[in-house]
Every structure is written in C-alpha cells, then in structure tokens.
Amino acid sequence: MRESFDIVCDIAHLDVLAEEIKASLGDAGVLLLRGNLASGKTTFVKAFAKQLGIKEAIASPTFSILHEYEDKLFHYDIYQCGTEGFLKSGLIEKFDCKGYHLVEWGEGEFENLLRHFGIAYGTIDITPNDLKRHYKVKIHAYA
C-alpha cells in the first residue's frame, strides 16, 4: 500500500489507478478530488465505480450535490454550494454511512470541516497533461 504517490496516466489506464486507490482505502474511505473544470474528477469517479462493480451510469452531481450508487459509493460535487452550503444541507451526516465518499471540489475549507469532525480523508489532485492526467495521491491524511 502506497500512502502518497504521483502518477501520469491516460484514460485507458485509469482503472489500474482506481484499483490501487481502492486497495489502499480498504472497504471504505473519503477522497477529496481536486482540479480545475474538466480536469477529470468525474472520469476518475467512473473508473472507481467500475472497480466497485457498479454498472449504473455515473454523472456529476453538480446541481443535486450528491448521487448515491448501490449504498457503497457516495459522489458529491460541492462546486455550487461550497463548504457552507454542504454543511447547511446536512449532508455531513452521510459520512456516517459505510462506503466510499468521493467529493469533487473538496478544497481547503472543506478539509478544515473534515478535521473539525475528526473524519479521515485522502486527496487526489488532478492536473491535465496533454491527453493524460497527472494524479497526485495522498491516502490516509488523518484529521
């Protein structure tokens, strides 16, 4: 298990990265997905869902904030509501559900929120690199 690593890969090899991250997390965890618009955050979630055996189509929950898949994958997008809106919505309680919680746009203020509640998390910073993406992964960044 690698707790921190960098990798550059294309979409064809994203499944391998998702598999490694899932193995590092074990049977549950919180991941903050960070990167600019169109950097590949939802594409990573799709690859991760595939590793979980989820067949349902994965879409970004930009306006609904949360999409749940088979009671094991919780996909959040807090771009529209921000940390304050997320907290006001009561969705922080969803983190009590066992499963994988992948949060798009989980930046500094959101990290502070997780630390405040004692929630362990990992981060994936995604940067476009031609037709590939650079993934900077930190697993088990504890509060």
Image (cartoon, helix red, strand yellow):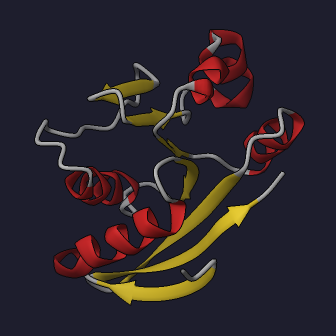
Residue occupying the point 73% across, 49% down: 120
Q: Nearer the viewer, residue 88 or 96?
A: 96
Using the rendered image of the protein, determine whether residue 122 is visible from the camera's viewpoint. Answer: yes
Residue occupying the point 36% across, 35% down: 72
Using the rendered image of the protein, determine whether residue 35 is visible from the camera's viewpoint. Answer: no
Q: Position of residue 106 (x, y in %)?
A: 63, 46
Question: Which residue is outermost to the front?
Answer: 27
Q: Nearer the viewer, residue 105 or 47?
A: 47
Q: In the drawing, does residue 48 fall left or right of residue 21?
A: left
Q: Position of residue 14 (x, y in %)?
A: 27, 74
Q: Position of residue 122 (x, y in %)?
A: 63, 59
**Image quadrant containing the N terminus:** bottom right
Vertically, is 113 above or below 88?
below
* Total residue callouts: 0
Question: Which residue is outermost to the right?
Answer: 116
Vertically, is 49 above or below 91?
below
Q: In the drawing, does residue 97 fall left or right of residue 143?
A: left
Q: In the drawing, does residue 62 fall left or right of residue 84?
A: left
Residue occupying the point 56% across, 58% down: 34
Which picture quadrant has residue 142?
Answer: bottom right
Q: Position of residue 107 (x, y in %)?
A: 69, 50
Which picture quadrant has residue 73?
Answer: top left
